[in-house]
Amino acid sequence: MKKIFCILSFFCLFSYAYELRINSNITTLKLDGQNLYIGTEKGEVLKYNIQDKSLKKLLSLPKIKDYYGDNFATIYSIDSRYDKLLILSEGDFGSKNLSFYNKKFTIKKLQEQSVKKIFFIDDNTFIFILLDSEIILVDRNLKKLKEFQFSHSSLSDAVLNEDKTQLVAGFESGKVELFDLKKWKILKNYNKMHKDNIYQVDFKKNIILSCGTDRRLGIVKNDEQFFLQKDFLIYTCALSPSGKFAIYSDNEAEISEIFNINNFNTIAKFHNMGVMGEFIIFINENEFIISGFGNKILFRKVNESL
């Protein structure tokens, strides 16, 4: 068991924090309590426990077929609910598969090939986020319950709020929209923050954060729209659990910066240590994770900044 663990990862301790390395490139992350679920381009899902720093491989998806033969099933998105997992992955010849994991796993082929993210609503209801600006509510058998088409602009990213009653979506057009999942309708359209494609959005404590191609960070607070203009593309951003702090990554300068949502003042800056930031997740108000397409995840503390 120790031998397998060493093959999968090793830890490098630094004064600033520590890093986790695995044996494949990371394609998605999902934090649920103390468990960090890691999806890879080799079709593996790993579970890393932040508290005891244990890592184990939960599953390895079967290889898929493409025009060159057999290949790994890249994992695109993971969502979790009480140790159950939804896993969106690559299927045969460019299709998409959905796996449901609860100690054992089942795989189903999706009819919709443009699904880019998946979320639990409850144990028996899931929501699909499609690139072509559509969301679909399905049951456990993948039967469509509801559909909604936003616009003709591609949907870049989406996230649910804490109680899974609302969804925030960011679009290629630069718009950010707030959607009510119970009423199944758009509540708000925010179009004053961005001029171009949005890479990521986050949504906590009724605060919305967005970042994108136009080198802007968008903030919606108390239904007012703000933006911070930067000099570089911003691929990833996140809010702390309380919504008090926000973080974004400047990949050109290899720096991540945390600022206060109330006054936009900088709280801390960090070296990314060679990581091209694509995923940032707050663990709590003082700790966060940063990673990207590579084999390394950095664990940082706010009070250990530059």
Image (spheres, rainbow, N blue to C red):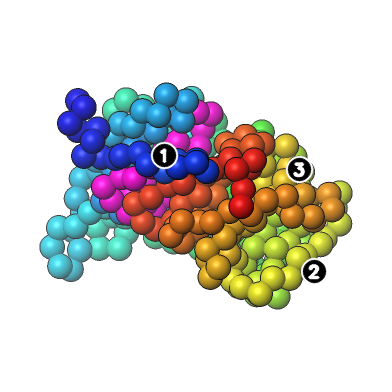
What percent of the width, then of the height, locates residue 221? 82, 51
What amino acid is labelled 1 in the image? Answer: Leu
Could you classify mark 3 by the number of other residues whose Cα lies within 10 Å: few (under 14), some (14-19), or many (20 or more)? some
Magenta residues, start to end? 20-40
Give the numbered dot on residue 244.
3
Determine which residue is flagged by label 2: 192
Main secondary-structure element of the magenta-colored stretch: strand
Q: Are marks 3 and 2 in contact (CB under 8 Å)?
A: no
What percent of the width, then of the height, locates residue 32? 51, 32
Q: Is residue 117 visible?
A: no
Q: Residue furthest front?
A: 15
- Total labels: the figure holds 3
Q: Looking at the image, which residue is at 42% across and 47% down?
A: 297
Element under disc 2:
loop
Q: Looking at the image, which residue is at 50% across and 49% down?
A: 290
Q: Are marks 2 and 1 in contact (CB under 8 Å)?
A: no
Instruction: Locate residue 205 relative to residue 19 in the image: left or right.
Output: right
- Nearest to the observer: residue 170 or residue 199: 199
Q: Is residue 2 magenta?
A: no
What amino acid is labelled 2 in the image? Answer: Lys
Instruction: Locate residue 274 relative to residue 107 in the image: left or right.
Output: right
Q: CA distance from mark 3 to mark 2?
A: 22 Å
What percent of the width, then of the height, locates residue 189? 77, 61
Instruction: Locate residue 200 relative to residue 56 in the image: left or right.
Output: right
Q: Earlier in the sequence, mark 2 or mark 1?
A: 1
What percent of the width, then of the height, locates residue 108? 32, 44
Above or below: residue 84 compared with residue 145: above
Q: Looking at the image, which residue is at 24% across and 57% down?
A: 92
Element under disc 3:
loop
Q: Looking at the image, which residue is at 73% across and 70% down?
A: 229
What amino acid is labelled 3 in the image? Answer: Lys
Foreground: disc 2 or disc 1 = 1
